[in-house]
Image (tube, rainbow, N blue to C red):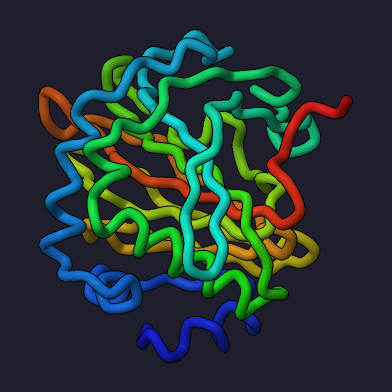
Amino acid sequence: MKLDDLIPTLRTQGYAVLDADAVAQAIGCDLAELMALNPQWNNLPLDTYMKDGGRYRRRRHSCFRVDADSVTQVAHRAHWQPLEYNALHGGMQRWFEPILSALLESPAWGKLLKWLAKVSSARSVAQPWFVEAHQFRIDTTDGIGRPTPEGAHRDGVDFVAVFLVDRHGIKGGETRVFEADGPSGQRFTLSQSWSLLLLEDARVIHESTPIQPLAQHGYRDTLVVTLRSGAFQGEPA
């Protein structure tokens, strides 16, 4: 899909997919700058909150407030979702280790968040966006890895951006996107490093199928960025 078609496609179907070259063009950096970030996924701590007992997910998490021309990292906070959006891990405060400065201080990082905020404002109303960023590595330590153990879901935000950072030695990991209030759906596999799936969260539900190993150490790395208006999603007072 051409970059010029992004907003019309979001308006029509509630999600859009961009290849890596279009992502780099949109952000305003060279694709090599994005690829240079990939090693930052090699030192993610184990997610210790997995209710299925799995050891296949590693992650870091940080939060930001993004205005049109500024990105401000906020005080480290827990990731929280209500049960209606995450039946497996909702209703609990999950404190993950923050994203490291080596990633956050890269020139591409601020450009990426500003561009996502710009696109979100173009589909909504220009405003500050409350942004949560998640680094994920799903691996085959348990023989199978589940990118979305909660199943097909929404996230309780306004927009969700899923960047495929890398995939190695695996099969599976198919992305599925369905209308939240209708029968239509699409199935495809993100395979290109720094390709992007952008979702309007109220209009679609999404999931990724499990991964299985083709090599001794298989994994799928993603960067998931959510944008929410008004405030961060947090436990009700």
Q: Is residue 19 above or below residue 11?
A: above
Q: Residue at x 30, y 31 (%)?
A: 100
Q: Position of residue 172 (x, y in %)?
A: 33, 43
Q: Is residue 111 above or below residue 166?
A: below
Q: Position of residue 210 (x, y in %)?
A: 41, 35
* Residue 87 appears left or right of 56: right
Q: Position of residue 184 (x, y in %)?
A: 66, 69
In this orientation, which residue lies closer to the viewer: 97 or 89? Answer: 97
* Residue 88 appears left or right of 210: right
* Residue 85 appears left or right of 147: right
User: Splitting the image into 4 quarters, where does residue 128 fall?
Assistant: bottom right
Which image quarter holds the N terminus? bottom left
Q: Is residue 71 above or below residue 132?
A: below
In this orientation, which residue lies closer to the viewer: 146 or 157? Answer: 157
Q: Residue at x 24, y 34 (%)?
A: 41
Q: Position of residue 23 (x, y in %)?
A: 31, 71
Numbered label tally: 0
Which image quarter holds the C terminus? top right
In this orientation, which residue lies closer to the viewer: 178 or 63? Answer: 63
Q: Is residue 106 above or below residue 182?
A: above
User: Splitting the image into 4 quarters, where does residue 98 fall?
Assistant: top left
Q: Residue at x 37, y 34 (%)?
A: 136
Q: Residue at x 48, y 61 (%)?
A: 70
